[in-house]
Image: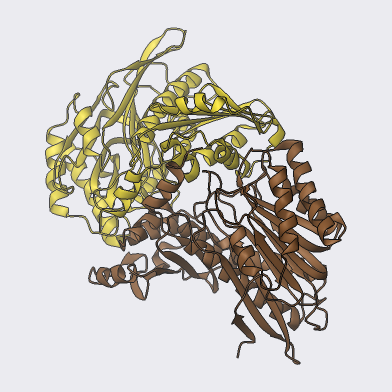
Chain colours: A brown, B yellow
Amino acid sequence: MSSIRKVKGGVTAARGFKAAGVRCGLKSKGKDLAVIYSEGEAEAAGVFTTNRFAAAPVRLCRRRLQRQTCAQSIVVNAGNANACTGERGDADAAAMAEQTASHLGLPPAEVLVASTGIIGVPMDRKKIERGIAAACRSLSRKGNDSAARAIMTTDLVPKQAARKLLLGRRRIPVLLGGIAKGSGMIHPNLATMLAFLTTDAAIDAKCLRRALRAAVEDSFNMMTVDGDTSTNDTVLLLANGQAGNRRITNPRSPDYEQFLSALKDLCQDLAIQIARDGEGATRLIRVVVEGARSREAARVVAKSVAGSNLVKTAVFGGDPNWGRIICAVGYSGVPIRPERVSLWIGRTLIVRGGQPRRQATAEAARKALAGKEVCLRIALGQGKASATAWTCDLTYDYIRINAEYHT
Amino acid sequence: MSSIRKVKGGVTAARGFKAAGVRCGLKSKGKDLAVIYSEGEAEAAGVFTTNRFAAAPVRLCRRRLQRQTCAQSIVVNAGNANACTGERGDADAAAMAEQTASHLGLPPAEVLVASTGIIGVPMDRKKIERGIAAACRSLSRKGNDSAARAIMTTDLVPKQAARKLLLGRRRIPVLLGGIAKGSGMIHPNLATMLAFLTTDAAIDAKCLRRALRAAVEDSFNMMTVDGDTSTNDTVLLLANGQAGNRRITNPRSPDYEQFLSALKDLCQDLAIQIARDGEGATRLIRVVVEGARSREAARVVAKSVAGSNLVKTAVFGGDPNWGRIICAVGYSGVPIRPERVSLWIGRTLIVRGGQPRRQATAEAARKALAGKEVCLRIALGQGKASATAWTCDLTYDYIRINAEYHT
């Protein structure tokens, strides 16, 4: 019996966390500023964009998490990415942390910052300042919904998830929760992936960082909407220890493994929510690769298929065009053996030994493609490693959203 | 004064080459089988797909060009890729070579084979056989147009180009020509890039291979429509020596350099024709990267920008969304320095030192995006190396072509 259970809630599901989302006017409508707060100091870990044009808030978080292992609050705005904004941008990100800290009675270094929205435009300081004041005033245990909404850009639905883990032999209840945003833009601009995670687990900084990296590898890093890596991608995780479990300090312990499983489960839930709500998406696509020689090989093949425009348009068209899937397996760069490859669309075996089965199966595959969720399973026949990637179909609306909205 | 001149014609521009394109019925309409023939034996070189599911004709050509350096004819069909067709596919590709050889009175090993079209369907042997007979009967010096048409799938226009090179101090006229096809599908299937090049230059096999690889690197390999590498991509080059120049045998000689320049020019011409006619394309996009530390770095950045769905939809929308271009520069993997990067859209400087110039320039950039050809120029400020990539915009019609045509 698994000790991980899905529970209601989001970034405030874990004990001791509060949040709030407010409108400060950076977006044309809706909430656009969120604050997340831990009652006590929390261990903190972060994973950030690999884009060389990292935005000012990303650079601020990176610097802080190099010097310190703790944080107590996160302030996030939507509507302006604070990227390509030079020294002014660095000052604005620092000011967001300072203002939040001052309202919450914290040292400024205890606050982390994230932004999403338009690139290359200076922040509207007045709006931000008013928003931070309002959010800090409204922090509550029930603020998860408003915070999830306040980080949206053109996301159609807010994204949150939570998990309860019964940890160790004593089955101490540990809670994990989070909110995330996916691809979208109010002004035509970059998609940004943001996720903010909290847990009441007691865990040291080293284990927390390690667990976050591992969980992100198998969740957010296995999800693609359009292959463009934003300047602002940020995943932050705070752990405040209020669960009262024996502090996790050994990455080889069963407790660590259990915590990692729950964290991975949470991150995958949020990643799937992002893929499902990708720009213009009508279908969630799950690409499962099995029988690879290594984990890395399985990941590369899965991401190659999930990243193919031709596969994604075929799914949009409801067309069981297996040649495109096989083609993306073939160009992934992994040395596969064509004669050993099998492919299922839904539950229908389409290709065995690198060659198609009789045409009669096309109808079953077509049916499998008609649902809201499509599973493409590829067996490489070379080993035992596997991986899963998530994406969405590529549709007219993706083009509309990204071509018709003008700067 | 450059000694390379654009001339009319295509794959039969060079002396001693004939071609023909005929209809054999593999496509729903139009010509679909071509034969190219050199009056004497020619040195041969080929570059092929890196896709692990390489089609049967690709494997046949690879095997032949490992064992031999000469060939005298190429037979190509459209409408069926002969990929994922197992042993039957290998036999069919070999039969195409044998039949062509028998009609032309050649040893079968002298014939190379290429295919494009649907994947995983056995070839219709009778149609192919009739087509080969008809094409061999109609070979002519003026067959370049019909051959260029016979290799099209959903290409909207045939693609051919030719160059005249005055070689060396004696200015011996050497001719080079070729035909190519780009992305398209009659049945929804893979885009395939095929190019067949001929020259009457006298050049040994080693130099020919080296020149072809170098020319392909800077032309076809710098062109992308949708990032999907086909199972059938093939570039073949035949050199029959009829120009009467002193045989090129030294890759460090001025003659080799001149020949390479002309070949590169020819390949770029064909690559640009393919990008311009990409599926659903309304605009040709040229991405020029300058000031890189190395050639390879410049190439990687140029291809990263050319491959970005967000950049391509922005160009379709005529939207000077420079943030997307800068973003694709940033995630290319090349260690750039944001504060040194400049960007021009058309002739308008948009970003200097990693930050936008005043908004007034947006209107000029918008105008630059309104034309049929768009140039995005990026200066990295790190060195002296440069590279150019070509692509097309991403449009509703790309989605229509790839989603609405059903298998």
Image coordinates for residue A61, horizontal then vertical, percent = 76, 53
Image coordinates for residue A168, horizontal then vertical, percent = 74, 88
User: Is residue A313 depicted above or below B212 in this figure?
Assistant: below
User: Is residue A76 depicted above or below B256 in this figure?
Assistant: below
Label tally: 0
Query: Could you tell me if residue A68 is visible in this image?
Result: yes
The residue drawn where x is 81% and y is 83% is: A244
The residue drawn where x is 55% and y is 58% is: A182
Q: Nearer the viewer, residue A222 or B323?
A: B323
- Residue B244 appears in which quarter of the rendering? top left
- Residue A365 appears in which quarter of the rendering? bottom left
The residue drawn where x is 40% and y is 68% is: A374
The residue drawn where x is 54% and y is 59% is: A300
Query: Could you tell me if residue A58 is visible in this image?
Result: no
- Residue A125 appears in which quarter of the rendering? top right
Q: Nearer the viewer, residue A273 or A361?
A: A273
In the picture, measured across the screen, residue A363 lies left or right of residue B239, that is left
Q: Nearer the viewer, residue A201 or B3?
A: A201
Image coordinates for residue B299, horizontal then vertical, percent = 56, 35
User: Is residue A387 depicted above or below B94 in this figure?
Assistant: below
Q: Nearer the viewer, residue A310 or A74?
A: A74
